[in-house]
Image: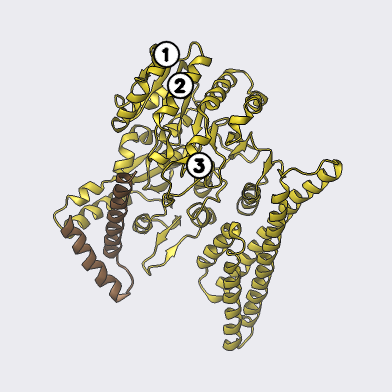
Amino acid sequence: MKELLSDLKTYLAQVNKTQEELKDEDLRKMFLASILRESSEEIKASEQK
Amino acid sequence: MKKRICIIQLTRMGDLLQTLKAIEPLDRENIEFTLVARKTFAQPILFLLEKKFKDVYLFDTEEIYGQKDLEEADKALQSFIDQINQNEHEIVVNLTFSESSGYLATLINSKNKFGLNISKDRKRNITDKWSQYLYSTALTGPHNPFNFVDIFKMIIGVPTEMNNAIEPTTRKKQIVIHPFASRTRKYWKPTKWIEFIKHFHAQNKDSKIIIVGSKEEKELADVIYESPVLLKYRNRIENLCGETNLEEVYNLVKEAELFVGHDSMVGHLASLHSTPSVTISLGTVRPKETFPYTHNALVLSPKRDCFPCTSQTVCDNNICHSDISPKVSALLTHRYLKNSQAEEFDYDDLNKVIHENSFLSNSMDICLALGDSSGLCRLENLALKKFSLKESIDLIYRISWLYILEEKEENIQLPQITTDTQKELATYVQGVSQVYELAEFGKKFSKYILEELATDNPDTDKLKSYSAKLDEIDKLTNALIKPYPLLSPLVNFYSLSKANTLGEDLVRITMNTFFLYNDCSLMCSVFFDLANKILGTIEEKSNQSDVPMEN
């Protein structure tokens, strides 16, 4: 999972650098990055309850 | 051919059940629904979702975590989206508002998108009015006077007048209790539930209580069940906590004569069959948004300035938990149950309990959910005699938003207010007048831009200067939130609407900007009139009586 997150981070850094119009592939990877972040935040919140 | 609507709801079970409740009245002969949800939240209630949604697509985060690399994860996601896109969707409605849902809404094909979507030029778009409302008001603070079911209905376009056809249910003489919620701040400690059950059973000689909950909640449920205080009632308590799946819990609340619990998804399960319910709302819960959507549902909550708090609020002792007396709650629940079983609900009967126990009920808000003339469901506070500023402004917003966004007039009696509220509300009337004046300036400069654009050779300098004026107007409007924090829903809504102004060219964008300022101005007028009517009520009442207004 760590590898997946690191690959996503590298990919998105590249996409954000170009500021070009997003492709479907970019949108999918942005979706993956955000849903993984949101779900890890949920896990953290439920641990803190 | 039936039209298909795709709904994205990536949040928790409670939100999924509220979504289900919102689409329930729609005629399935003409419309079919697709649901995109998270597996972790939707799987346990799939038996319900599959009854109402033609297709349910479950996104499994765990499966993505399990992929060996990014390309494999992307492939799995592409296949998931391809499956959804096999059907043609007339509309995609995103009810979630998280960033992830915004990308997903863009990836699902449809010409019409409601709710947040993030376009390929990286712009965050929210173009429909009720989604703008949800995003700017409900998600930013405790200023939303509508139940989420009603907001979802208005976003999707379900006529609010359409009521759910509920199959008649033969109810058993049993009361289901779920004494837990998602966070400790939202539920009583076992000692309070023990006291509640003791008083309730003492009032109801033949009642039977069933405790439900998850495996994780079993330890606390056992503390309640095994309490020596409840020894003499043990034959009338059944502890099923940790022993039932959600389908079994659903069947239990469906047949129960009453459900009692905190703000959790079990209350929403009960509302699907209009089971009478008593909800004890604590901590971060915003009762107006999440009360079980059933006519006459009873909601008890703390009457305290810090309620509802937020998850960021530091609170070690959950002080609001002690505002709700278990004894009075049990007494109210007892009377509520009797009234629910009677041919006609006697509201005065509950009021009697409140008055007879005023010492203990003073710290509580005691509300009933009422369906009103506009077809929406709202909470009516039985214990409240005079409105505070926040309560008055919440009511003004409710009537004004419905009028402006839905062209509905809600027939609600205007409240009496305290003398302190009178002064504060009069100050807010000045604040609204300032927003109104700024909106009128916005109309004026939008009109100047349109007039300049209509000339043969529009003067760029003039256009720039008018446009700068509009920016200044927006900045000044936003600055009004500081002295008038309760105006933030109004200011934020029009700020978000302006950021999403539609139009293919400058003329159309400016025309829509003009209409937006016009709407803002109209909203201020409605707000202004209602506030003055409330203030007028005070004056009339003061004139009729020599008794000075109480504080």
- The number of callouts visible is 3
| Mark 1 Cα shell of 10 Å, populated few (<14), some (14-19), many (≥20) | some
* Residue at the disc numbered 2: B197
Precedes in sequence: disc 2 or disc 3: 3
Quarter-wise, where is residue B190 in the image? top left
Q: Mark 1: which amino acid?
A: Tyr
Label 1–label 2 contact, CB within 8 A: yes
Which residue corresponds to the image point at 37% horizontal and 46% vertical from the top-left?
Answer: B11
Q: Mark 3: which amino acid?
A: Val
| Mark 3 Cα shell of 10 Å, populated few (<14), some (14-19), many (≥20) | many
- Is residue B546 visible to the viewer in this orientation of the structure? yes
Any idea which chain is the brown one in this picture? Answer: A
Q: Position of residue B437 (x, y in %)?
A: 69, 68
* Residue at the disc numbered 1: B233
SS class, disc 3:
helix
Which residue corresponds to the image point at 63% horizontal and 81% vertical from the top-left?
Answer: B454
Precedes in sequence: disc 1 or disc 2: 2
Q: Mark 2 falls within which chain?
A: B
Q: Is residue B133 left or right of residue B265?
A: right
Q: Position of residue B542 (x, y in %)?
A: 82, 45
Q: In the rendered view of the protein, which quadrant contains the C terminus of chain B?
A: top right
Precedes in sequence: disc 3 or disc 1: 3
From the image, state the color of chain B. yellow
Q: Is residue B233 left or right of residue A33?
A: right
What is the distance, in whole Å, between disc 3 and disc 1 at their CAs?
A: 38 Å
Label 2–label 3 contact, CB within 8 A: no
SS class, disc 1:
helix
* Residue at the disc numbered 3: B149
Task: Establish whether labels 2 and 3 are both on one chain.
Answer: yes
Quarter-wise, where is residue B429 in the image? bottom right
Q: Mark 3 falls within which chain?
A: B
- Structure colour scheme: by chain
